Amino acid sequence: MIGPILAAVGGYLLGSVPFGLVITRMLGLGDLRAIGSGNIGATNVLRTGHKGAALATLLLDSGKGAIAVLIARALWGEEAAALAGLAAFFGHCFPVWLNFKGGKGVATFLGTLLALDWRVGLIACATWALTAAALRISSLSALVASVVAAIAAFVLDGPVVGGAAALMTVLIFIRHRPNIERLIAGTEPRIGKKG
């Protein structure tokens, strides 16, 4: 019983590290929450015009989900790994250090899936990349990729990984509600547009 609890708590604390905010402050780019969408993720970091910072944020936000999964799997098995990844995702979205006001979780979602099942993770990444290349809209790419990934997780891995992916997908849609409203209105910004 202690294993799943430690996996959840450890995953949450790791996931709640706001790398985008830390990186932009270290580079003197200002408070990320006052730029563009105010989000702490890689897409908003890109709006600062610093591609290196955006890439670092993407890798670190993805990595914290993957690391949580890999540690939990090594110590307590597959179900604990799924729980740790889900907790890391929630930590990114609702970090204790920022009064529970975090990011939208897409990079952490992708990193978590890559660690849980690389096939599902690659499907998610490929779907995001293809949609982004075609439409140049990060939020729409994330929404499409999350749905495709959740379906793939259920088909390839069953209810444990599939259920975790589905829960993350639901929260991704909730966190993207303003983006969805802008998509419907045709006012959602394109990838690379500065805030």
Image (tube, rainbow, N blue to C red):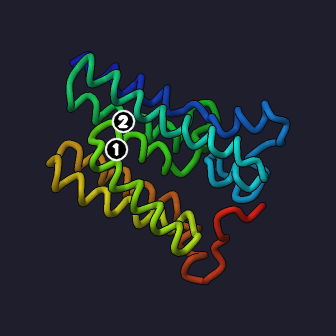
Question: Which residue is pictured at 23% across the width and 52% down the height?
Answer: 153
Secondary structure found at label 1: helix
Label 1 Cα crowd, 10 Å radius (few <14 / some 14-19 / many 20+): many
* Image marks 2 and 1: residues in contact by CB distance under 8 Å: yes
The picture quadrant where one finds residue 195 is bottom right
Expressed as whole percent of the image width and height from the top left, the position of residue 40 reads 65, 45
Expressed as whole percent of the image width and height from the top left, the position of residue 183 reads 56, 77
**Which residue lies under the disc numbered 1?**
113
Expressed as whole percent of the image width and height from the top left, the position of residue 2 reads 26, 16
**Which residue lies under the disc numbered 2?**
85
Looking at the image, residue 52 sits to the left or right of residue 137; the answer is right
Amino acid type, callout 1: Leu
* Most foreground residue, 28 or 166: 28
Above or below: residue 122 compared with residue 148: above
Q: Earlier in the sequence, mark 2 or mark 1?
A: 2
Q: In the rendered image, which quarter contains the N terminus?
A: top left
